[in-house]
């Protein structure tokens, strides 16, 4: 595959970071000067939706530009098939050097089945510094090896303010700092070899457990009472799909903790403070990455992408963590793109699907898209060739039994337009309908409102179309018959 452009790519993907966690997104509590500045230099996308609200299906989608169901990697714990083609593999075949630090999660990674490093297909990554999370469940977790080499331990006891928060290590010994250290080592060496590169920084923050460095969390203590409580109207789940009521009593089908009604207002505020403190840490570490690009004189030739794989409920709608629901906190993520060719200093209000990043990277690097790719490139928007409000008329997300077991099994899909959001609970003869103009907080379910029957029907037809259009375009058709 020929390469038209010589452009490096620094692709930063956090884990479980919702859309409203940056200063440039309107959050007045966090401290994110580096990401705010990056947004000012590039384009910040306001309405970006993951194709699945849990890790593996979303990552499979945005690394291939194919919907989770199309990749056959629609659940956590599934192995991505070997014939799926990832963006870093395409770049490597075009002469790029591609590396990763942190989490990949395109395969089963539970310690019961993953005894060593995560199984991999030909993903294109050569340097592969693997740390699925901050836990000690694998002998090959390179971050934990790094901690042991330095004799670093830290307490596992709950935070004094809330049993739902735990102190992590000092920032310089956190997994995010380790991921960034590996990336900086890579990008400092890269210029000597004269090859373009892509590096994926896949830190585990701000994924639960909510365990920021104590110093980062203490900053929020003085203003704890000013932190807003979760967006939850008591009783709002009564007419919503059953899985939400299950997770209200405990995340992940009841077994993941964070039973909403057992948490005090102080608990809710401390969890939110811990989550934001982890975002603060991410921002400082992104600052180190940008400084390293400047010091090595590679900033002007590097496309920088900052995003996340999906969101976090954080108590909104009476639910923590993630599951079979498509509220904005669960599926809407931040996205900032800056670098050569990008017309910066702009905000994009268009509807975007997160997996649109796959063809975007290929277009930016001057590479052809493979036949099976279903996503739409953002490169015309980034380069000013089309208006920033022209991209998609709606976005689609799916959940086909994607994480922990529910009874009944959770199959749900979502269509979000500029004004409405529809979700269908398949097999349950129910769902959700929100008028986002009147109810942007998504608390009043209009599914059963007779006055909205025509709207619901129209949206369901659009959703059916989107589901049909996720059909795999592969193998390519060779003849008329």
Image: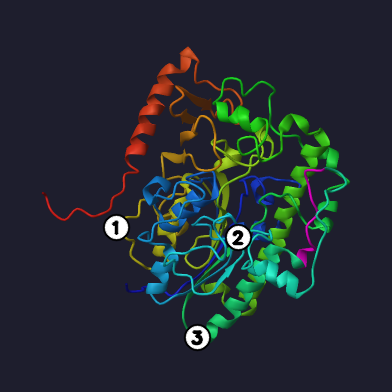
The x, y position of residue 408, in whole percent, is 51, 29
Say if residue 207 shows up in the picture: yes
Residue numbers of the magenta segment: 163-172
Given residues 382 and 253, the one toward you in this image is 253
Element at label 3:
helix
Q: Residues within 10 Å of mark 2 (few under 14, many from 20)?
A: many
Residue in the image at 72% along x and 32% along y:
260
Residue 306 appears left or right of 477: right
Is 331 on the left-hand or right-hand side of 133?
left
- Which residue was labeled with disc 3? 193
Residue bearing the label numbered 2: 132
- First in sequence: mark 2 vs mark 3: 2
- Which secondary structure dominates the residues rendered in magenta? loop
The residue under label 1 is 371
Please provide percent x and percent y for residue 314.
68, 40
Question: Real-space Cα distance between discs 2 and 3?
Answer: 29 Å
In percent of the image, x 81 and y 33: which residue is there? 264
Q: Of the residues under marks 2 and 1, which one precedes in the sequence?
A: 2
Q: Residue 192 versus residue 302: which sits nearer the camera?
A: 192
CA separation in Å, label 2 and label 1:
31 Å
Can residue 375 be seen from the camera position used here? Answer: no
Disc on the earlier residue, 3 or 1: 3
């Amino acid at each position: 595959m020929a390469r038209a452009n010589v452009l490096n790519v620094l692709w930063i993907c956090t884990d479980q970071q919702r859309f409203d966690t940056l200063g440039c997104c309107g959050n007045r509590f966090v401290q994110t000067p580096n990401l705010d500045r990056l947004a000012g230099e590039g384009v910040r996308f306001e309405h970006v939706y993951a194709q699945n609200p849990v890790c593996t299906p979303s990552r499979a989608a945005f690394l291939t530009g194919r919907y989770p169901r199309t990749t056959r990697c629609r659940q956590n714990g599934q192995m991505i098939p070997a014939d799926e083609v990832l963006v870093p593999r395409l770049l490597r075949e075009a002469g790029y050097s591609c590396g990763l630090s942190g989490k990949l999660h395109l395969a089963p990674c539970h310690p019961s089945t993953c005894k060593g490093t995560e199984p991999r297909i030909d993903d294109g990554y050569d340097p592969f510094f693997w740390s699925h999370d901050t836990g000690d469940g694998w002998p090959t977790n390179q971050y934990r090896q790094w901690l042991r080499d330095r004799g670093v331990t830290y307490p596992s006891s709950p935070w004094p303010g809330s049993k739902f928060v735990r102190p992590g290590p000092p920032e310089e010994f956190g997994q995010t700092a380790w991921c960034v250290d590996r990336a900086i080592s890579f990008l400092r060496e890269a210029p000597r070899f004269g090859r373009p590169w892509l590096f994926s920084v896949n830190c585990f923050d701000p994924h639960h457990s909510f365990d920021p460095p104590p110093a980062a969390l203490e900053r929020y203590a003085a203003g704890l009472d000013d932190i807003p409580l979760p967006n939850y109207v008591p009783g709002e789940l009564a007419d919503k799909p059953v899985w939400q009521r299950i997770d209200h009593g405990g995340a992940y089908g009841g077994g993941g903790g964070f039973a909403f009604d057992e948490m005090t207002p102080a608990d809710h505020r401390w969890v939110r403070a811990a989550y934001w403190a982890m975002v603060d840490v991410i921002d400082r570490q992104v600052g180190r990455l940008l400084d390293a690009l400047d010091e090595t004189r590679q900033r002007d030739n590097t496309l920088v992408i900052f995003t996340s794989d999906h969101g976090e409920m954080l108590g909104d709608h009476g639910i923590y963590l993630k599951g079979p629901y498509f509220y904005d906190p669960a599926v809407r993520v931040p996205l900032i793109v800056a670098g050569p060719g990008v017309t910066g200093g702009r905000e994009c209000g268009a509807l975007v699907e997160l997996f649109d990043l796959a063809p975007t990277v290929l277009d930016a690097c001057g590479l052809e898209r493979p036949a099976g790719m279903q996503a739409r490139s953002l490169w015309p928007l980034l380069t000013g060739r089309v208006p920033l409000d022209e991209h998609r008329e709606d976005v689609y997300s799916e959940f086909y039994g994607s994480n922990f077991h529910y009874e009944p099994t959770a199959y749900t899909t979502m269509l979000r337009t500029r004004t409405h959001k529809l979700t269908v609970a398949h097999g349950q003869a129910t769902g959700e309908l929100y008028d986002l103009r009147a109810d942007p907080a998504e608390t009043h379910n209009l599914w059963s409102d007779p006055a909205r029957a025509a709207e619901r029907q129209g949206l369901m037809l659009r959703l059916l179309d989107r589901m049909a259009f996720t059909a795999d375009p592969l193998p390519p058709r060779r003849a008329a018959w």
